[in-house]
Image (spheres, grey):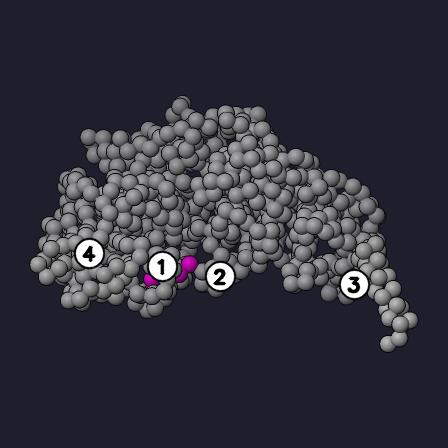
């Protein structure tokens, strides 16, 4: 190459770089499949796009439900409300009605709320800590409470749930074995166990150790339980027993006591109630080694607080007494499940039928039946009844949940055969929930639950399947996580179907939000909300519910650096709304601009996008909706944080082999980082600018190009040519 050619190449390269930097990039295309028979979902926004009400600090309830505060909440536009049941997460009994009766005439035992409405309206309801708890912590109570299995007090004891025994299930107790697990936190040599039994004790049980690479509680498919060679007991007599489990120590982190036959002797509460005389009870457990002299070396920390060695249990007896009331200001876990009368009369439900829960894991069928009878007598509209709360987080096996489900379903349908019941209300997982394999090697939680219902001829009692969706872990959520959401929500819904959920049973995402501290209140939270809610409906879901409507903004317990999780508002020290967050504006776009805020059918279609980055991530997702007013409304989410994208929108009808485009006046509504910027300052975090969305009118045509601002959620709305 001569010098002239070299100079020419240099100048040509510079010209290309200059043009690339100064000329707009060619528009990329969003293709909408508008074929009428290709509708992926038809829904009413008032019933498909909902929100939630959860437990709040006891001193915040009256403020949150003040008319001026409720008015601001309603302005977000969400429809039906899902009432969340938080006491189950903290191993508490729920007194949904403060008035009621105790099973023991002395004023303790099992509480049943009064089913008869009175002139006094229920404004507040609270949880009562269970005395016979066997959890140090689990998937709900990570920072509060303790187990009675190693609290160092022989006057206390763990006891299993009586409703999982033959007396209530009608099945042999071996079908619902109860268990406790000890977590040594790291591998130790184990050769002996000492069990101080209470009554009722186990006549038949075995002691096992865990092998495998996975966590025995949270990765139950990645390992196996193995019997200690001398750990099988068939003629237990109760009392305090020391068992040498093996001739030589076994190195393990987890040990399980699996109980299959009860003595059916009565516990310390007496023989007047048969629930006191079934199941299993243990005062204290000691685990370690025995030396050649017979001296027992205990590896466990015994303490009545979170410093104890970790223990887990299959279930907990819901026996309690008035002194167990757990109530303290400024704390959700000791706070108020807002009273049902307050909930239904405050206006927050818009008069729509609500999704309401019953306490099943730590309740009684009689109490749940009384609750639903009360609501029916009040005339409150009920859409669905959710059975319990997050049994997977409580480490409950699916057959045990199924046994409770059927007992409660019988009681509730006795009160009203028309109640639509469902569950299991899974935690926010993104993959199938795996449990310890059964005798047939099956380890899918949902699959085994469905099999249990089918085996009892009761699948019809499952009117809907519900789950929660919290797709991200950790306190720092990278921007790249936005690219995952459409696939995450679509995938987990397909998992439930693959587990055997019949196609005719609706899917409800009864509680959802992104996780990750400050990201939730930054523009990230708004874009995620659009992708998740529209993605859920595109995948065939029936209703999804934003968590949560009430403006409760504490620091997330796992994210002490953040006050920015799970809410549309920031509040002041008196719990009054002081500012809207990004998800409030996104909610308005979804409920009032993308959809029409009316109870009428909206038809949802699919769209494809070729707007990708160098790694193949789709940067612009699209959700086309044909509204009752005849307008096409396309939600376009630009997940490119730094760059705008120019796109064309084409509609293709495969049946008529025709193509269309927007024509005439087209409304473009944009909410992005230009309209909203979050500034983290702990509880004093704030947004500036703080909205609102920007609305403009553009002209549609086949060649029209629509510019999507960086990091923005956009609604493009108009009619065909």
Residue 60 in picture, x, y percent from top left: 46, 28
Q: Nearer the viewer, residue 350 or 413?
A: 350
Farthest residue, direction left: 293
The magenta span reads 433-437
Helix or strand or loop: what does disc 3 sit on?
strand
Q: Which comes before the other along the chain, label 3 or label 2? A: 2
Front one among 387 and 228: 228
Tell me where residue 537 appears, x and y as whole percent.
Answer: 59, 53
Which residue is identified by label 2?
Answer: 495
Whether the residues at callouts 1 and 4 have beta carbons within 8 Å, the answer is no
- Residue 658: numbered disc: 3
- Residue at 57% of width from left, 45% of height from top? 519
The disc, 3 or 1, on the residue closer to the chain's N-terminal end is 1
Discs 1/4, front: 4
Dot placed on the residue nearer the N-terminal end, 1 or 4 = 1
Residue 189: name its quadrant: bottom left
Mark 2 vs mark 1: which is more N-terminal? Answer: 1
- Residue 288 shows which numbered tag? 4
Foreground mark, 3 or 2, reads 2
- Circles 3 and 1: CB distance less than 8 Å? no
Question: How far across and down, in percent of the image, does residue 663 sit?
Answer: 82, 51
Q: Is residue 399 above or below residue 382?
A: below
Q: Which residue is mark 1?
A: 215
Sequence-wise, the earlier of marks 3 and 4 is 4
């Amino acid at each position: 190459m001569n010098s002239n050619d070299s100079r020419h190449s240099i100048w040509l390269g510079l010209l290309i770089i200059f043009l690339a930097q100064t000329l707009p990039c060619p528009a990329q295309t969003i293709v909408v499949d508008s074929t009428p028979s290709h509708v992926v979902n038809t829904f009413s926004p008032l019933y498909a796009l909902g929100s939630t009400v959860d437990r709040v600090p006891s001193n915040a309830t009256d403020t949150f439900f003040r008319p001026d505060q409720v008015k601001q909440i309603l302005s977000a536009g969400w429809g039906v409300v899902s009432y969340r049941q938080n006491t189950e997460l903290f191993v508490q009994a729920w007194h949904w009605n403060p008035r009621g009766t105790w099973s023991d005439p002395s004023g303790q035992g099992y509480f049943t709320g009064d089913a008869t409405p009175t002139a006094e309206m229920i404004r507040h309801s609270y949880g009562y800590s269970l005395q016979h708890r066997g959890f140090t912590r689990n998937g709900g109570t990570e920072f509060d409470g303790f187990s009675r299995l190693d609290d160092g007090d022989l006057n206390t004891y763990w006891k299993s749930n009586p409703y999982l025994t033959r007396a209530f299930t009608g099945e042999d107790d071996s079908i619902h074995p109860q268990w406790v697990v000890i977590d040594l936190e790291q591998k130790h040599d184990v050769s002996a166990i000492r069990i101080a039994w209470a009554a009722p004790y186990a006549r038949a049980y075995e002691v096992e150790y865990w092998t495998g690479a996975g966590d025995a509680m949270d990765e139950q498919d990645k390992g196996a339980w193995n019997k200690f060679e001398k750990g099988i007991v068939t003629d237990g007599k109760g009392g305090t027993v020391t068992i040498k489990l093996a001739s030589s120590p076994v190195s393990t982190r987890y040990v399980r006591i699996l109980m299959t036959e009860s003595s059916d002797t009565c516990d310390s509460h007496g023989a007047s109630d048969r629930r006191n005389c079934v199941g299993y009870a243990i005062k204290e457990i000691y685990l370690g080694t025995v030396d050649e002299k017979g001296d027992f070396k205990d590896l466990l920390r015994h303490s009545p607080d979170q410093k104890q060695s970790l223990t887990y249990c299959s279930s907990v007896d819901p026996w309690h007494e008035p002194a167990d009331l757990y109530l303290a200001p400024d704390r959700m876990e000791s706070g108020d499940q807002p009273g049902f009368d307050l909930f239904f009369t405050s206006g927050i439900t818009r008069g729509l039928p609500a999704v309401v829960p019953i306490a099943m894991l730590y309740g009684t069928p009689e109490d749940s039946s009384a609750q639903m009878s009360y609501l029916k007598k009040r005339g409150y509209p009920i859409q669905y009844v959710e059975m319990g709360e997050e049994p997977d987080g409580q480490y409950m096996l699916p057959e045990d949940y199924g046994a409770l489900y059927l007992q409660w379903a019988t009681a509730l349908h006795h009160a009203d055969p028309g109640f639509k019941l469902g569950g299991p209300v899974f935690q926010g997982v993104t993959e199938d929930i795996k449990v310890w394999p059964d005798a047939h090697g099956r380890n899918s939680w949902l699959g085994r639950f469905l099999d249990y219902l089918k085996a009892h001829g009761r699948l019809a009692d499952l009117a809907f399947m519900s789950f929660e969706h919290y797709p991200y872990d950790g306190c720092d959520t990278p921007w790249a996580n936005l690219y995952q959401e459409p696939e995450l929500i679509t995938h987990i819904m397909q998992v439930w179907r693959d587990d055997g959920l019949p196609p005719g049973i609706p899917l409800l995402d009864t509680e959802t939000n992104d996780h990750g501290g400050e990201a939730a209140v930054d523009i990230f939270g708004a874009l995620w909300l659009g992708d998740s809610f529209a993605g859920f409906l595109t995948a065939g879901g029936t209703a999804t519910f934003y968590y949560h409507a009430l403006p409760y903004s504490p620091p997330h317990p796992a994210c002490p650096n953040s006050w920015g999780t799970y809410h549309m508002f920031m509040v002041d020290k008196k719990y009054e709304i002081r500012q809207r967050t990004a998800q409030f504006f996104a909610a308005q776009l979804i409920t009032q601009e993308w959809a029409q805020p009316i109870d009428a059918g909206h038809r949802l279609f699919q769209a494809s996008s070729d707007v990708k980055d160098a790694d193949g991530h789709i940067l612009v997702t699209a959700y086309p909706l044909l509204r009752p007013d005849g307008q096409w409304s396309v939600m376009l989410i630009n997940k490119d944080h730094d760059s705008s994208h120019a796109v064309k929108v084409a509609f293709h009808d495969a049946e008529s082999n025709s193509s269309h485009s927007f024509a005439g006046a087209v409304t473009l509504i944009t909410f992005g980082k230009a309209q909203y910027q979050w500034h983290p300052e702990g509880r004093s975090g704030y947004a500036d600018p703080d909205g609102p969305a920007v609305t403009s009118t553009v002209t549609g045509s086949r060649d029209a190009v629509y510019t999507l601002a960086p990091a923005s959620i956009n609604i493009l709305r108009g009619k065909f040519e």
